[in-house]
Amino acid sequence: MQKATFSHCVNTLLDGGVVALPTETVYGLACLALDSNAVDKVYQLKKRPPTNPLIVHVLDLEQATEISYPNSVCKLLCRKFWPGPLTLIIPKKKIVPENVTAGLETVAIRSPSHSLFRKVLESTGMPIAAPSANPYSTVSPTSAKEVMNSLGNSCPPVLDGGKCDIGLESTVLDLTCETPKILRPGPISKDEL
Ligand code: AMP
Ligand code: MG
């Protein structure tokens, strides 16, 4: 599939399909996070093991609260670092399908700052699951062209948002342990946190 318009991408998502979207970190393979059939398609397209959970993208803390239970530390971090490249692991609500979190009782949430991704979140009004838009265990794409090259014939519609500003996956911070733990180093450093 080739590049697609904004409205085509939004309609594809609302129809339970998959599209590639730009974020400030890398391009994501996106679907509605609360649609477990759509989530299955993302795992299949990426050939991602079902044991590797997805990050759910939200507009803001208010939308995060619809799918998870943010504690006071989480709220503080969201106010300081969102929208931006910080993913937080917190307890999930029942509404989140099992396949999104690979059966875990926690969910990874992040609010991206990329204006196009935010416009998609506003238009769908729903949280969006999106791992990087490349086959499992290959390099994450930072342009529409890299997405199309890496996914080849199985590439879904791509929303071209130019080159990603950061080009590095988000920092992942686990807030479910007594002391918050960095699970994946990224653009936001331990010192900043
Ligand atoms: P990716 O989607 O490829 O950028 O990777 C998402 C990262 O978040 C992976 O390292 C996952 O293991 C991690 N992750 C997602 N959900 C959870 C969770 N509930 N608990 C711990 N790590 C998670
Ligand atoms: Mg990845």
Image: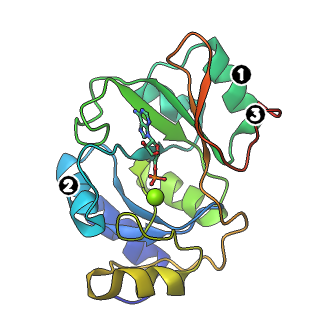
Q: Which mark is residue 190?
A: 3
Quarter occupied by residue 29: bottom left
Question: What label sits on residue 135 in the rendered view?
Answer: none
- Which of the pair 48/116 is nearer the observer? 48
CA separation in Å, label 3 and label 2: 33 Å
Residue 109 on image: x %, y %: 50, 37
Q: Is residue 132 left or right of residue 36?
A: right
Mark found first going from the N terminus, 2 or 1: 2
Instruction: From the top left corner, tell me how far across and down residue 173 is, in percent.
Output: 59, 32
Residue at 55%, 80% in the rendered image: 160
At x 33%, y 87%, the residue is 152
Residue 76 numbered tag: 1
Q: Residue furthest top?
A: 178
Q: Amino acid at mark 3?
A: Lys
Task: Name the residue furthest right.
Answer: 191
Q: Nearer the viewer, residue 54 or 75?
A: 54
The location of residue 70, given as percent across then percent down, is 53, 20
Say which residue appears at 67% left-offset and 31% top-offset: 78
Amino acid tagged 2? Asp
Nearer the observer: mark 3 or 2; the answer is 3
Dot 3 surroundings within 10 Å: few (below 14), some, or many (20 or more)? few
Say left or right for 62 vs 1: right
**Which residue matches tag 2?**
40
